[in-house]
Amino acid sequence: MKLENKVIGIIGAGLIGGSLALNLAQQGLKVALLVRNKQNFIDKNANKLKANSFYFISEDFSDLQKCDFIFICTPLREILNTLELIIPYLKPEVIITDVGSVKTNICQQAQLILAKTININFVGGHPMAGTEKIGFENAFAELFTNRPWALMTEAQKFPELIELISLTKANIIFTAAQEHDQAVSLISHLPLLLSIGLLNTVNNYADSNIKDLALQLASSGFDGMTRLAKGNQVLNEDLLKLNSSQIQKAYLQFCQEIKTCF
């Protein structure tokens, strides 16, 4: 398969989708961006778009019929609805994946949505990459370099998709959806919960004088610990809600572990 002859559709040009688009386009691939408002997107990002060449930019899902691969890079809460909306416009044999950070519900529901379709493939995905910043204006092509990219499939399946993602220089990890959600609850979602808790503990401290002094004294340690809490609030809310059962298990074990520190 020659990827240079294929069209890669990316729905949602935020930090993740935008970085993926820049990465693949800079390697000479045909990248199509699907955005909410084409003219507003072009006006807002004129300089960045001038420096990078995309196959096309559209706000019309019907243009997805040209795509061989589709990455759904919308907010987590919109992934399944987006999948339903695009089905009428897809070509046979298209491979769809997403970048959502919670996988069990998405993978289960995606299979139900696609149950009545023919020759449309869905593979759950999750690149473990990002920053506390959002939007295409903060996207950069190197975002995925040496970062894990989880795929909810087996290594021998979907070789074309694996080849495509490999071009980003991400480290692909093959796993199952439920195992993925258990694992990320420990190393991603629990840290987010603790980050939010720490930030709120300080901000809501009863003695305002001590709180103000604490914030004056805060340095790199506090900044590092609360960085996640200050990130994408929509994403934070979604993943804490959609992976709540696994996060609760991780939190209870964490509470048991810290008891040994006192």
Image (tube, helix red, strand yellow):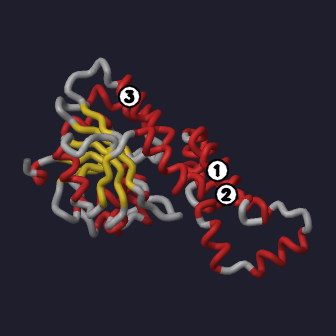
Query: Residue 148 appears at what percent x and percent y?
Result: 36, 58
Where does label 3 land, which residue? 84
- At a point 64% along the width and 73% down the height, the residue shown is 223
Where does label 1 land, which residue? 253
Residue that protrudes farthest toward the front in the picture: 260
- At a point 35% along the width and 50% down the height, the residue shown is 150
- At a point 17% along the width and 46% down the height, the residue shown is 160
- At a point 48% along the width and 49% down the height, the residue shown is 183
Determine whether 200 is above or below 162 in the image. Answer: below
State which tag comes first along the sequence, 3 or 1: 3
Report which quarter residue 14 is drawn in: bottom left
Foreground of the two, 43 or 111: 111
Give amino acid for label 2.
Glu
Work out how far the residue at label 3 is from the one at label 1, CA to CA, in angstroms. 38 Å
Report which quarter residue 260 is drawn in: bottom right
Q: Secondary structure at mark 3?
A: helix
